[in-house]
Amino acid sequence: MRYPSDHKERSRARIVEQAAALLRERGIDGIGVAEIMRQAGLTHGGFYAHFDSKEALVEDALVKALDDTRDTLAQHAATLPPAQRLEAIVRSYLSRSHQDAPGSGCALAALGSEIARQPPPLRAALTRQYDRLVALIAGALADAGRPAEGASAIVSTMVGALTLSRSVDDPEKATQILRRARQAILTPAASA
C-alpha cells in the first residue's frame, strides 16, 4: 500500500504532539516509547523511522510544548491594545484553567526541575525556548510602558507560581498563589 507523500511528516507530527502532552502530564521518566506510539495511533516498531532515540523525541516534544505555550499567550494578547497585552498574558498563564491542564500547559512549569538533570542538548533546547518566552514578555512590558529588563523575573515568577499552585494540596492556597503572583507582576510598584 502506498502512502501519501506527506505521510511520514504527518506521523512524526502526531508522535511529537502526543509526546508533548504526555511529557507535561507525567514527566520524562513517566512515559515510554510504546505508549507514545500507541497514543499517536502508530506501532512501536515505527518509532525509529522518525527518531534516533527517546531523547531526540523528548527534545522535539519539549520545543513543541513550549512553542504552543508561547503561541497561545501571544494569541491572547495579539488583538488587544498594546497597554493591555502584558495583563492578558499574565492572567492567561496564571489562571486556574492553566493550572488544571498540565497536559496542554507550560512545559517550563511541568518539566523545569526535571530538565535540569538532563543532558546538555535538552537543557539547551529549554534555554532557547525560555529566551523566546522572555522576549514575548519583554515586548509586552515595552507595550505597557514598563522596562523590558524585568521580563526574565516575570517569567520566573509566573513559572514558579504555576509550579507551586499545582504542587500544594490545598485548592485555596493554590488559588492564592496564582492571585498573588498576578498582583506582584501587574502592580508596577511591586516590580520596581
Image: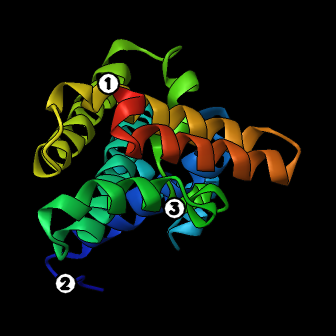
**For the residues bearing labels 3 and 2, Cβ distance under 8 angstroms:** no
- Sort mark 1 into few (<14), some (14-19) or many (20+) by Cα contacts within 10 Å: few
Q: Position of residue 163 (x, y in %)?
A: 62, 37
Q: How is the image coloured?
A: rainbow
On the question of residue 52 being in view, the answer is no
Residue 66 in the image: above or below residue 88: above
Depth-wise, is mark 3 or mark 2 nearer the camera? 3
Earlier in the chain: of badge 3 and badge 2, it is: 2
Read off the residue under disc 1.
192
Read off the residue under disc 2.
4
Earlier in the chain: of badge 2 and badge 1, it is: 2
Callout 1 amino acid: Ala
Q: Which mark is residue 104?
A: 3
Callout 2 amino acid: Pro
C-alpha separation, residue under disc 2 versus residue under disc 1: 56 Å
- State the SS at label 2: loop
